Image: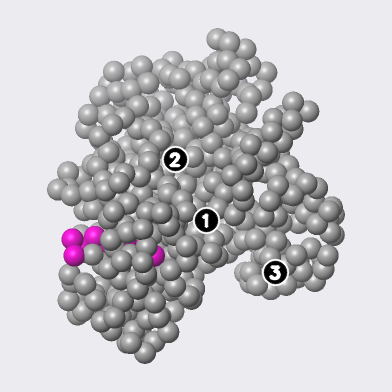
Amino acid sequence: MALPDQAPDTAPDDTIIDLLIAGGGINGAGIARDAAGRGLSVMLVEAEDLAQHTSSASTKLIHGGLRYLEYGEFRLVREALIERERLWGMAPHIIWPLRFVLPQLHSPRPAWMVRLGLFLYDHLGGRKRLPATETIDLRTAPQGKGLNPGTCKAFIYSDCWVEDSRLVVVNAMDAQARGAQIFTRTRLVSARRDGKTWLATIADNTGQRTVRARGIVNAAGPWVEDVIQRTADPATAGNARTRGVRLIKGSHIVLPRLYEGDHAFMLQNPDRRIVFAIPYEGEFTLIGTTDEAWTAPPGPATISQGEIDYLLETVQRYFAVNIGPENIRWTYSGIRPLYDDHAASASAVTRDYVLDVDAQDGAAPLLSVFGGKITTFRKLAEHALEKLGPHFPMAGPAWTAGAVLPGGDLPGGDFDAYVAELANERPGLPRPLLRRLARAYGTRTEHVLAGARTIEDLGRDFGGGLTEAELTYLARNEWAVTAQDVLWRRSKMGLHVLPQTEAHVDAFYAALQDG
């Protein structure tokens, strides 16, 4: 996306923005939204697409992190559990409850320990709407269908599912609606302090420009240390040696549906690691995640053969299926930028976050985000603005707790009722299409459909109900530029359309941009 009125190596104008945010993942988008809502002027730059890396490669859960209790992460778990129901209320179109079955077969933890953990999980975060834990016998319960023989006792507990990429996008949309400038395909080249402000150089495919800002937020995820090094102040760059990230690769595989029902499974492996099996996109089961140390520079990640073998072995340990690599429909991998607490194993590294503010002698601040998890993004943003508060006394108070995200204002928070209302108003449109659109866009579905009453009104169908109207909406409202942006981030339609669809969508976007 081109920057407005820019030219290579231009001098800055007299405009000074309050915050320049580097990174368009969940933390950058969340901080941009919070800051803009407090009345600060905000510019966010993302070198690629929103949520292109870590924030689109999660297990897609809004959860407290049951296994983190084992490592004594009580503060983190409590904060995440409180956020769980809060976020569900803010975005009920892209976040919804999910029940998890936790079989005790193959468990390296005794049942009493698991039950104690679940008791804490039920009560630590003020659960109100989600059902409590229960114990079942998988030999007779419907949740046992499809599992290997010998599986008997299991616990069922509650967490929530989230469309992770869409959570990033709706935060960016809300930030923009509150005055923030959001630039994708735009990178922070360098920055240096100049008096009481930062002088930063940013670039897109048309050239460079300079921006003056009162503060910088480094929310670059795996690239957080790289951004620190791009600041010219040697003292600031030195922080990269004392505050660090530990890069951990997590991979997932998508298989044809392994079992019936809307429940998920939390599978305990003999090595004490956890793998989830989750209903996915109607026809599939999502399996993940792994924990592998990433020692190369940050960049695109792909699944290794060892990770494939590990996940398939887990599936075969629990499910009565004959499954192999040939059955994998899709894989995705991401690098999680965890705060380096020097834990011995990748699985034990803390998922908590650290916010580091460099503002020596009253200089313009640089706030760097280390670690974090998607569930706590809103609270992280709130804490970030608290840290920056002394530098921005004009900023308004905290406001995001309970403030709905774009599309989340479903009447009564009732998703099914909203879909029924759409179907009643537009009987000429297929109900499955309306349901999919509502899951993606919530009340913004009406903007996607505009005045459409029949499928023909939506223009060309690129396959699976992905229409010209939807592609145009995504380009104009959600920074979509390529087929990858649409098929694998703002949706997972890539699983439901023919391979040649990608080329057709790219051609459509090229023509749209030329027009």
Q: CA distance from mark 1 to mark 3?
A: 18 Å
Q: How is the image coloured?
A: one colour
Q: Is residue 466 above or below residue 453?
A: above
Residue 209 appears in the rendering: no
Residues in magenta? 270-277
Q: Residues within 10 Å of mark 2 (few under 14, many from 20)?
A: many
Whether tag 1 and tag 2 are in contact, CB under 8 A, the answer is: no
Q: Position of residue 289 (x, y in %)?
A: 34, 55
* Circle 3 residue: 418
Identify residue type, mark 1. Answer: Glu
Identify residue type, mark 3. Answer: Tyr
Count of numbered badges drawn on the protein: 3
* Circle 1 residue: 163
Q: CA distance from mark 3 to mark 2?
A: 32 Å
Secondary structure category for the residue under label 3? helix
Residue 499 appears in the rendering: yes
Secondary structure category for the residue under label 2? loop
Dividing the picture into quarters, in which one does residue 80 lie? bottom left
